[in-house]
């Protein structure tokens, strides 16, 4: 019995079938884990001149993932940080930081009213559906980030934007889980561009 099983195991056709099945199972597991995880990506960031300052508009995609969305619906408030930095590149030294700004956005769900709440810069808005809340959350408009006096026409500057979940604001039990889980590692890649300024 053992000999016949070993003979079957060594069969090249069986090996090919086994490898295909194993590969398919691994692919399914990987796709499931990617589907369950969150993902953030910045599509565009634009600086717009105002009277005395520059305003920042940002558009990004946000996918929280199943586990994070489940926590949101159980009453866990999600604190996100949107960070902006403007620097002046220097050839032989560190870049010179010209301006920086940070905006906190809190996303939460109120079970009694069945509303999604977004708190941003001392203003709160309520939404009946997750899609409406997500549309508001993923668009930043007219964020005052620095004064016009900070920059000079014709000089080279580097701007950067990053969006991330502030894990330090999660409930303590979730902080421990988040520190070792990719599910809670919600952060975009830095979005970099070289803005040009006019007087």
Image (tube, helix red, strand yellow):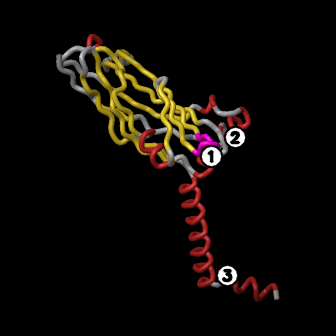
Query: Relative to 182, does residue 98 appear above or below in the rendering?
Result: above
- Given contact means CB atoms under 8 Å apart, are the residues at marks 1 and 2 in contact? no
| Disc assigned to residue 184 | none
Asked if residue 1 lies left or right of residue 9, the reply is right
At label 1, counting other C-alpha atoms closer than 10 Å, the crowd grade (few under 14, some 14-19, many 20 or more) is some
Q: Tell me which residue sits at (31%, 24%) in the image.
A: 55
Q: Nearer the viewer, mark 1 or mark 2?
A: 1
Magenta segment: 109-114
Asked if residue 62 lies left or right of residue 29, the reply is left
Q: How many marks?
A: 3
Q: Nearer the viewer, mark 2 or mark 3?
A: 2
Find numbered disc 1 in the image and state the secondary structure of the residue it sits on.
Answer: helix
Which badge, 2 or 3, is on the more N-terminal residue?
Answer: 3
Q: Position of residue 156 (x, y in %)?
A: 24, 21
Which quadrant of the view contains residue 191? top left
| Disc assigned to residue 177 | 2
Find numbered disc 2 in the image and state the secondary structure of the residue it sits on.
Answer: helix
Majority secondary structure of the magenta segment?
loop
| Disc assigned to residue 10 | 3
Q: Which residue is mark 1?
A: 73
């Amino acid at each position: 019995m053992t000999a016949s099983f070993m003979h079957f195991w060594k069969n090249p056709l069986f090996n090919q079938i086994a490898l295909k099945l194993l590969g398919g199972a691994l692919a399914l597991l990987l796709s499931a884990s990617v589907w369950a995880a969150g993902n953030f990506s910045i599509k565009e960031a634009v600086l717009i001149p105002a009277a005395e300052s520059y305003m920042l508009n940002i558009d990004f995609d946000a996918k929280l993932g199943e586990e994070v969305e489940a926590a949101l619906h159980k009453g866990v408030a999600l604190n996100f940080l949107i960070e902006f930095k403007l620097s002046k590149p220097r050839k032989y030294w560190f870049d010179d930081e010209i301006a920086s700004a940070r905006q906190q956005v809190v996303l939460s769900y109120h079970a009694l009213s069945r509303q999604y709440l977004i708190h941003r810069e001392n203003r709160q808005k309520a939404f009946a559906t997750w899609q409406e809340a997500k549309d508001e959350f993923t668009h930043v408009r007219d964020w005052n980030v620095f004064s016009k006096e900070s920059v000079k026409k014709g000089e080279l500057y580097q701007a950067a934007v990053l969006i991330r979940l502030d894990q330090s604001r999660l409930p303590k039990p979730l902080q421990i889980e988040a520190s070792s889980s990719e599910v809670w590692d919600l952060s975009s890649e830095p979005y970099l561009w070289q803005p040009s300024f006019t007087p």
